Image: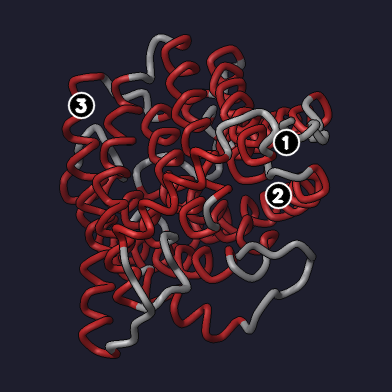
Amino acid sequence: MVPSTWQFNRPLPPALRRGLFAALPVGVGLLLDLALDVPAAGAVSTGALLAGFVAFDAPARTRLVWQGLTAPVIGAAAALGAMTSEPALLAVVAMTLFASVAGITVAVSPRLSIAAMTCVLALLIAQGLSLDAHEAPEALLLGAVGAMLQAVLSGAAWLRDRDAEPLDPVAGFRTAVRVIRANLNIRSRSFRHALRWGTALGIGVAAYHVVDLGEHGFWIPLTVLFVLKPEADDTFERIAMRAAGTVAGLALATALAAIVGEHPLPDAVVLTIAAGFSFAFLAIEYALFTTAITAYVVLLAHALGQSAWQAADERALGTLLGIAIAGLAVVVWRNREYPAFA
């Protein structure tokens, strides 16, 4: 589902149409976030964004089922992030364990892996917001509501087009459990990736508790999450794409923030477009996806009251540290073949 070269992996117009349609709940979620003005700032729009990546290329009915099942997990992950943001050791342990469990899903399918990644992202963002433990129910509710907005949109789309693909959630669950069980050993490349991914994300969380990057420390594990792949060649290619896309995204978002100012409706429109491009580009060109998602994150922070002009250096430093951690992870823990069972 993710391209391995610096070129479009599939035609852009269909993906962009789907992406902009899926981005509508993100704009609605942002307007709700601005109206609510709660400590869990951006929870609804973030939940809608994360759920938009789930089963993105699937027919509407399949998206409805996948998003409906993923929405409460996204909310629960956000609540867990609120409960484990402090102290630093608790945040590191929670991220390492949660991400390691989620990482093993690469053995099952790209679709399940992306759904699991969105849940790790919910945990990561909630930890990065440094919410208090008593705000966990709020994070759970608002994050799940945002994700369910995507499921509602998918349901409406299914009523319109009625496209379908074979779908048996019970059989799919049993297959996933069987595959995961078969990969719970050190000989499995998927298992080794899961441990490496979880450990690197835990190190990324530890790094932003040590290096003072203010509210932008979560860019360190965020970068690790997106670039660290099971194979070294894929990881190093992602690192180059991430670096290029982040620079372009920061420049684009800063310029757009200056144009739209701090007005809710223009902010919602620009963020909806950025989310739409993020959905579309994830499947067809990773460097451009990085540009779009970087612009989205910066513009969301700007809409919630953080100046896009300030802390650009902190975001860039966080990205560089994340790249370094991901690079070291594949260098220190290289894949190697293990002897087969006797």
- Residue 323 has which mark? 1
Q: Along the line of sight, which residue is nearer the eye, 284 or 251?
A: 284
Q: Is residue 245 left or right of residue 112?
A: right
Q: What residue is shown at x 65% (from left), y 36% (from top)?
A: 193
Q: Estimate the spatial distance between the alpha carbons at disc 2 and disc 3, rounded to whole Å.
A: 33 Å
| Residue under the image location 42 percent in, 36 percent down | 125
> For the residue labelled by badge 3, is the local secondary structure a helix, a strand or a loop?
helix
Quadrant of the snapshot with the C terminus: top right
Disc nearer the start of the sequence (2/3)? 3
Q: How is the image coloured?
A: secondary structure
Q: Amino acid at mark 1?
A: Ile
Q: Which residue is found at the position 62% from the left and 55% from the top?
A: 290
Measuring from the top left, give residue 255's x and y in whole percent.
Answer: 58, 58
For mark 3, what is the residue?
A: 135
Circle 2: element type: helix
Label 1 and label 2: CA atoms lie apart by 8 Å
Pick whichever, 193 or 157, lies toward us: 193
Taking 248 as reference, is 20 left or right?
A: left
Residue to which mark 2 is pinned: 242
